[in-house]
Structures are given as C-alpha cells and as structure tokens.
Amino acid sequence: MERVYNFSAGPAMLPLEVLEKAQKELVNYKDTGMSVMEMSHRTKAFIEIAEGAERGIRDLMEIPENYRVLFLQGGATMQFSMIPLNLLPEDGSADYAVTGQFSGKAYKAAQKLGTVREAVSTKAENFARIPAQGELALDGNAAYFHYCMNNTIFGTKWPYIPDTGAVPLVSDISSCILSEPFDISRFGLLYAGAQKNMGPAGLTVVILREDLAGHARAAVPELMDYAAQIKGESMLNTPPTYGVYLLGLVLDWIKEMGGLPAMRAYNIKKAKVLYDALDASSLYKAAADQASRSLMNVTFFTGDPELDDRFVKEAAAQGLLTLKGHRSVGGMRASVYNAMPMEGVEKLAVFMKEFEKKNG
C-alpha cells in the first residue's frame, strides 16, 4: 500500500526522509551492532545522540545560554502539574489564559496545587478566537502567566506573544514548536510533546530559564523537580531514547530545509492553500476567526454533520486520512504540521472543491 497523507493532530506524520533514515539504521546503528532501541542510555553512542539533539534544537530555536533543555516523559500533560509544583509558591498565585481544551486542562490541574486565576477565557465563544492583549486581566505579582500558543482542537494560534511585564511567561507549544522562529528570551518556560512536530509520542521537551529551577516544593518527587532533572541531565530514569534519536533526525531535516525561517514560509504557503479554498467556498465555513487562524491546524465544517461525515469517509478513500474534527468542534480538521508536504495540502484542496461541486 502506498503511503497516505495523514492529517492527524497527533501522533502526526513524520518526514519520509526521516523515516527512511531511521529504517536504514534500525537494526545496526552506525556499526554498533544494535538498534538505538536496544541501546543503554549510558553508552557513548547514545550520549552523542542526546547531545546532538540538544545542540540541534538549541541552534534551530536560538536558545540562549541561560536556558536549559530537558528531554522528559509524561507528555505535555505531565507539565500541567510539574509547572505549578516548581514555579508556584504555596503562598503565591499564577495566571492562566484559557483559550482551548489543553489550556483549560492545565488550569484545572494547577487549581489542585495552588491558587490560580483565570486571566482570560474564550470558552463562551467556543474558543474560536484569541483574546487581544487588552483583554488579559493580569496580576503583576503572579508567579507566572500560562497560555497555549497554538490550540490544536480549535485551530487557533496566538498572533502575538503576550506582554506580562516581569511575570515569567510559560507556554505550551506542543503543536507549533519548530514551525517558526520566535524570541525564546521572552519566555520563562516552554514545553512541548513531541508527537505533533518533533517525533514520536513519549518524548517531552522542556526549555527552562535557569533561574526558575530550584524552587520546587519539598514534597515534590525527584522526577518532577526541574533542578533535579537538570542535575541528572534528563537521565534520572531511562529517557525515551528512541524518541530523542528521532528528534535528532527531524532537527537535521529542518536544518536541511533551511531552518525555522524557511519552515515558517513553507507553512504559510501550505495553510494559505486551504484557507483560500475555505474563503472561496459557499459550502465550508472556517471554525476559527480569521485573525486567530492557526498555520498548523485548519478547522472547518459544512454545518451538516451527515455531510461532514461523508466528507471524511470520501477523503479517506482518496488517501486523505484523519480529517474528522474533534468532538467539541465537529466538522473537519486538517493538521498540516512541518512534515505534511505541499502535495498533500494541494490534493486536499482539490478534493474539497470536487466535493463541493457534488454536494454544494
């Protein structure tokens, strides 16, 4: 069977070149006589893999020297608890922007661990837009301000980095990491699950400003203590070794593509193909407000659930898979992360027009 165009929100497709290289090295990695999957994380070969992956992500994202990069487990969801356990004093408070499901889950998790405020919410509008800077009810004494940069389910993206003054900015960038350059120094902490834009599920990347480590509560388990993870070089327990290896291959691929500026330009072109098709259509409606549209997740619907289901089934028959929208939004969702080639996006746009001719 030929490979399909997988529009899944995650785990998502990987670059074919990366998969082919991993396939070539699967059984015998660089004449070690074993697969990376069989390799001890304490061996010289794997330490070189891990150091190379950290060096690669630092170079591509231009991460300043006073930030640490951690390769952890537990997904972005684990960070919903790790962040307040490390950054939120028991007598302090933190601000949360709730603009989608995952930022809502982060807010709910933090409520169990301390005092947190909802600085803004767009739930009443079904998370169809991103609030403006002036809508943020900020606390100048907050321990940190948390937001999700790209909302995978609703197809929205913050078009700006919030200005929180001296309050550390914390962001979940799971679905937009490595898709475009931005100023890391504006943030105190960034985190991302790998399964959307970096590699397979199981690896989580945390980028942490050094001065924010070392403040964990006394009862925090060692594995959830950023300072302990920094000291242990992300190896307090066995790290997700194969995920780190594949991350390194993805980083090499992005570098060959021209780095993050080139990646952003490519992603803009891909998303434009779909948004142009939506804007020219009388059948489809975009789920996200135009000013808040994501480059990574394009959400749309016809308004008829039965017609939406038919769209998904007929698209799948043409090799356009996993287009069903999340149940909280309905309709369709095309996730066009870095690895989605232009050919896949163009084929989807053609299908959309053909489907409209038959059903519009």
Image: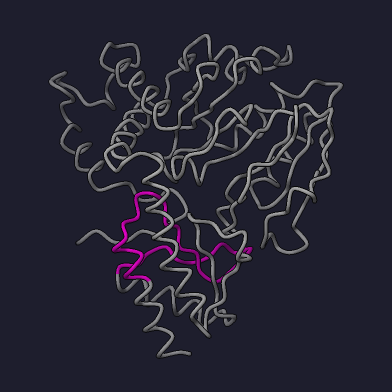
Say if the magenta span includes residue 275.
no
Q: Based on the displayed image, in which of its 4 quarters is residue 34 positioned?
A: top left
Q: Position of residue 21 (x, y in %)?
A: 20, 38
What color scheme is it?
Answer: one colour
Q: Position of residue 249 (x, y in %)?
A: 29, 34
Q: Based on the displayed image, in which of its 4 quarters is residue 345 positioned?
A: bottom left
Q: On screen, 137 above or below 330?
A: above
84, 149: nearer the viewer: 149
**Residue at (30, 21) in percent of width and height:** 49
Please indicate whether residue 354 sits to the left or right of residue 287 in the image. left
Q: On screen, 347 above or below 206?
A: below
Image quadrant where one finds the N terminus: bottom left
Say if the magenta span includes residue 327.
yes
Tally of numbered tags: 0
Q: On screen, 118 above or below 4?
A: above
First to last magenta residue range: 319-348
Q: Position of residue 248 (x, y in %)?
A: 33, 30
Q: Position of residue 99 (x, y in %)?
A: 69, 52
**Residue at (57, 82) in percent of width and height:** 304
Q: Based on the displayed image, in which of its 4 quarters is residue 267 positioned?
A: bottom left
Judged from this view, the residue extending furthest toward the right is 91
**Residue at (25, 43) in percent of width and height:** 19
Q: On screen, 171 above or below 82?
A: below
**Residue at (41, 68) in percent of width and height:** 273
81, 152: nearer the viewer: 152
